Amino acid sequence: MDDARLRRQLGVGDAVFVGLGAMLGAGVFAALAPAARAAGSALLLGLGLAAVVAYCNATSSARLAVRYPSSGGTYVYGRERLGPFWGYLAGWGFVVGKTASCAAMALTVGAYAWPGQAPAVAVAAVVVMTAVNYAGVRKSAWLTRVIVAVVLAVLAAVVVATATSPAADADRLDVLAAPAGAGGVLQAAGLLFFAFAGYARIATLAEEVHDPARTIPRAVPLALGITLVVYAAVALAVVSVLGADGLGRATAPLADAVRAAGVSWLAPVVRAGATVAALGALLALILGVSRTTLAMARDRHLPPALAAVHPRFGVPHRAELAVGAVVAVLAATVDLRGAIGFSSFGVLMYYAVTNAAALTLRADEGRPPRALPLLGLAGCLTLAFALPLSSVLAGAAVLTAGAAAYALRSRARPHAR
């Protein structure tokens, strides 16, 4: 079944929850602090800028997914609209960067659930989430609904507890609109964009949703809009008790916020919520990476054996097992939580290719208003190079290595024939 197609099993609700599971992952529990350190009192400006770029990217992704309703996301769009190299480069950056993100999410699960045995718990989490994905995309979608419900309940409790606390100070919210250095705001937007990037999971599942021309354009903006509202509410609530400076110094922002609000009993609940959120992000990440791996294997950029589709479960089972195995090894041997800045760079470059591909769509192919992909392309490139220098260098090195591998393979191909 190497060339078999995946089964269309997901509706609009399923697709929205898959996107929410990826976007409302551990990012909301951790991304606010480094963004506050970068933007200071202009945190919400960074959040708004990240949301604008994400909306442009989401619109381009949705229009392209309708045109090319198969697994692979931007790997497929770049290949079909810009040429094989650009599709390959986008897919390479996505698979490598997101595999590291999978390991980081797994380690986050371990750090919250059992800090003393984080690597062992991380490996166990990878095994369980890979097994869930292997059992079928419907089961993954069902579990994602449960995870999203738990995470939203925890975040709602944090917002209510902090907003109604005597420690909440409305004066702290006034400074959120104060001027800040443009570089800091851009860097914060680049960091926060990573937390929005989960809507790509909806596009990479295009081969598994019913009526993609209707489902994807509805699911992507819904998931993105809900996430923006949740992030803004949480950011406002946390800043109201910690202040922008306090948030920037926090190691566990939401737990620190509930303690500052005088409801310390909620801190363990926040830790549990962060564990569940990281599991949801891990589930969605493995789902997305395995589908891009499937698409690249179909084109023989990765071992063709990874293109197999399970005859019973209708999933790319070999790709899922391969991704799970690599992630488990990384989680057991390397602490990637503080060293995956190149993933943010890779994701932004991935979406730069998405927007460039959307610019080539004709009006009769569902082209979005030209300003959106243009703004998305410029935004992605600006935010990518506004990231910390170490992230830019690491990301550029990964993409260069992928380009070199592509060139070597292309040069060897005539001799192989």
Image: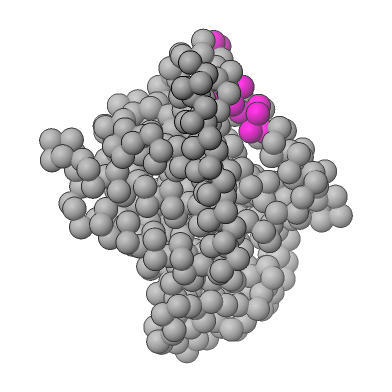
Q: Position of residue 217 (x, y in %)?
A: 29, 41
In this view of the protein, which residue sits in the foreground, 239 or 75?
75
Q: Where is residue 375 in the image (x, y as percent from the top left)?
A: 28, 60
In this view of the protein, which residue sits in the foreground, 275 or 305?
305
In this view of the protein, which residue sits in the foreground, 398 or 306?
398
Residue at 41%, 87% (x, y): give it: 178
Residue at 77%, 50% (x, y): give it: 334
Residue at 13%, 35% (x, y): give it: 364
Q: Can residue 203 be seen in this view?
A: no
Tell me which segment is drawn in magenta.
Answer: 311-324
Q: Residue furthest right?
A: 116
Residue 322 falls within the magenta-colored stretch:
yes
Q: Where is residue 309 in the image (x, y as percent from the top left)?
A: 53, 17
Q: How is the image coloured?
A: one colour
Q: Which residue lies furthest to the front in this view?
A: 415
Report whether 404 appears left or right of 262. left
Residue at 26%, 44% (x, y): give it: 358
In this view of the protein, which residue sits in the foreground, 390 or 126?
390
Check the image and report above or below for 255 versus 394: below
Q: In which quarter of the image is residue 79?
A: top left
Q: Can residue 312 be seen in this view?
A: yes
Check the image and report above or below for 107 versus 243: above
Q: Residue furthest bottom?
A: 171
Check the image and report above or below for 161 versus 181: above
Q: Quadrant of residue 5?
A: top left
Q: Where is residue 346 in the image (x, y as percent from the top left)?
A: 50, 52
Check the image and report above or below for 172 versus 223: below
Residue 183 falls within the magenta-colored stretch:
no
Report whether 230 appears left or right of 304. left
Q: In which quarter of the image is residue 53?
A: bottom left
